[in-house]
Every structure is written in C-alpha cells, then in structure tokens.
Amino acid sequence: MLIVQKFGGSSLADAQRIRHVAGIIADTYRQGHSVVAVLSAQGDTTDELEAKGLELNPRASRREMDALMACGENMSVALMAMAIEAIGLPVISLTGRQAGILTDSNYASARIKSIDAERMRTELDKHSIVLVAGFQGYNRYDDITTLGRGGSNTSAVAVAAALKADICRNYTDVDGVYTADPRIVPNAKKLDEITYDEMLELASLGANVLHNRSVEMAKRFNVPLEVLSSFTPDIPGTKVLEVTKMEKMQVSGVTRDNNVARISLVGLADRPGVAAGVFSLLAKEKVNVDIILQSIGRDETKDISFTVARKMLDTCVNTLREHQKQLGFVDLIVSDSVSKVSSVGAGMVNNPGVAATMFEALSDAGINIQMISTSEIKVSVLVDKDDADRAVRAVHDRFFG
C-alpha cells in the first residue's frame, strides 16, 4: 500500500515527540508500505515566525511573510529526516517546491493548481521514506507560497490524490472525530465513520480536526481519510468516506464557532434589488456571508441581518459605511459577542423533527436563538457567545444522551 501520513504541530513539538513520530513512520515502512509523510511546523513555530516578521515590519508584504512562514515546515521535515536516518532507514525531505506543489499567487492563502509528483515517485521507487513540508508550494514566479492556516491538511490530501495513495492518515492530538468537542462535552462519543459532506460541514462550522479545504479536496478526488492520534497510533480512528453505514443516525455531531459576528442594516428601502446591492458589494471585497435574516417590510423599509467571520468584520463594516448613501440604510448595528451552534448529520434529510428537537433543547436550557439557518444536513443557530458551550452540551445531550 501507498500510505500518506500527516502529522500536526503538537505531534512534533519537541525532540521526544519527533522521535516518537519517526517511530510511527518507521513502523509503517517496516510493514512493507510505501510512505509519504507530510509535516506541519513544530508546536507554536508558525505563530512565533509571524510575530518575528510583524515585529520588524507590521506592514510586511505577504510575499516575504510567506517566505518566512514556510521555514517552520522546512525545519520539521529536516529534523524528522535526521531522526529517521538515526533509526537506519532511507529517507529524504522535500520542500513544497521540490515536491512539485504548484499554487496560484495568492500569498498567505494560496490554492493548489497542480502537483508534479515525479520527484516523489522517483524517491519512492528507490524505497525511500518521503517527507514533504506541508502548508507550502510555489507559484509561476518560483516564489514560495503558503496555503493558509490548516494548510498542511490540504497538502497531505493533495499529495495523496496526486500519488493515488490508498489512504491518507491524519495524525492529531485527538484519536478521531467526536460527536462534540470532548473539552466542552465530556461524554462526547467517537465516530467510527463519517461522510465527506458531514465532515466538511463540521470543519466549516468550527470543528478543528480537519481543515475544510482538505475535506473538499478529499471528496473531489475520492481520497479515503482517517483521523487518529499520534499519541495512540494503534487505536483505530475515524474514517471519512463517501458512503458510510446504510442507516445513518439523525445527527453525527454538534459544534460551535465563536469566530463570527452579526451585522444588522436597519432601515433599508423595501424594494427589489436592495439585498443584491448589499451582498454584491461584499462579494467584491471577498467577504463571505453566512446566516441571513430579512425582516418583513414595514413603512416601505426593511432590516437585513447576517453573519460574517470575525476576521472580516472590519472590512465588512468599513465597506458598508463607505457606501451607506448608495445602499440607503439608516443604521448599522454590530455584535461580535455571538456564537454559531450547529447540528450536522446526513440523516437529517429524512427526519424533519431534528430542528424542533434542537430548538426545544435550547429552550429548556433557557438559551435564546437570535438567527436560524438550515440545509439538508445541518441546522445552525446564532446564540449569545456566553451561552455557546452550554448550548452545545444541551443539544448534544438531547441527541446523544
């Protein structure tokens, strides 16, 4: 089998953990498998590198920041190669450029365009363990680019797709995907399997196990994924597949996202095209809008409320205020003390009572719902941030208790 393994920063935090991961890679290799391991930067290295750059120049160019930020993964693969060499196994470390990972030129959040896997295949044919620096690639100008936070997950899936690997195993500090964050819900249950769609929703809604872009890519190229712990590698994790069990449970997981903000535009004209004008303007600024609620028109005016990622709040507010006269709203109200709580499950489509059950659980817990959004496999509500963890526990207990 050709196995791609991905190890996160917490699994590589110090020399002891690097040796431990080297043992996992070596054991897989000794079992007769071909192995490619994609590594993140050690521990908090990425944050530390970013801080160093911003200390020298708070307005540093994204190109130079990418050149700096990629150093963490380069260090990881070099150190891991040394550890595996010490074991006595053939190994080679490759940067994103050497691994043939070509991206666009959107520094700091580049997208992978293609992978020339010839170098990796050549090294595998030599029966070497191949170590690839995650999170990075190169563009048509031969500049270093980075894929954004969580990008090593995407790197691993892309490498697995390019090499047509049999499986991509994502080793983290948790031993699988749970029905909720065990730090919030102590009785959360580990899932044996979950679909790509469910995992994508959970990743997009605040679950930090896998990066949503990596799940999108895995689904597109049908790459089997498995999430397991680098600390207990012999314990089976959670498999992410196209189709899982025949009879799906109604809800597979409950999660929350605190990195959201709500914006309300008050006193918009109640006429066709107003909403289109608002959201077209935000789209030009690359602001993704999530939950949207529009009031019933009154006195020829209406209100529109919506949520955005908190990191885009300033851009959103500045854009709207700049065009207030054009859009014609009376007031703009902002709240960043909110959280989005979501239930996700492929079984929802055939169980119309899921939303009602979730709302009843929140009502019984005395938690007020500010906004609601639904799809075939999710129900999301906006609640006060101070109530978020309690809301997750209440909904989880109702579905899984």
Image: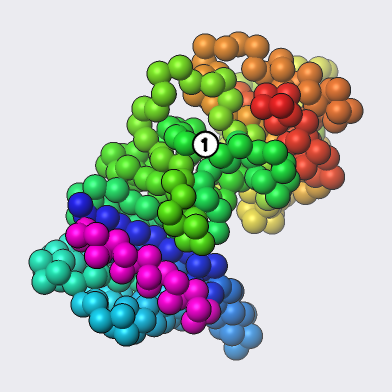
- Image point 72% across, 43% down: which residue? 186
Residue 271 shows in the view = yes
Q: Nearer the viewer, residue 298 or 140?
A: 140
- Drawn side of residue 253 relative to residue 359, left or right: left
Residue 383 is covered by the magenta coloring: no
Q: Nearer the viewer, residue 224 or 162?
A: 224
Q: Nearer the viewer, residue 287 or 115?
A: 115
Give neighbour class at mark 1: few <14, some 14-19, many 20+ (Cα, 10 Å).
some
**Residue lying farthest to the bottom in this orientation:** 56
Q: Nearer the viewer, residue 316 or 185?
A: 185
Residue 292 shows in the view = no
Query: Is residue 282 depicted above or below 381 in this figure?
Result: below
Residue numbers of the magenta segment: 14-35
Point out the image quarter for the C terminus. top right
Query: Is residue 343 depicted above or below 63 in this figure?
Result: above
At which x and y percent is residue 242?
Answer: 35, 31
Residue at numbered disc 1: 191
SS for tag 1?
Answer: loop
At which x and y percent is residue 212?
Answer: 47, 46
- Image point 36% across, 27% down: which residue? 243
- Drawn side of residue 216 relative to residue 274, left or right: left
The amino acid pointed to by label 1 is Leu
- Drawn side of residue 353 relative to residue 22, left or right: right
User: Is the magenta region chiefly helix, strand or loop?
Assistant: helix
- Image point 60% across, 11% down: which residue? 352
At which x and y percent is residue 149?
Answer: 51, 61
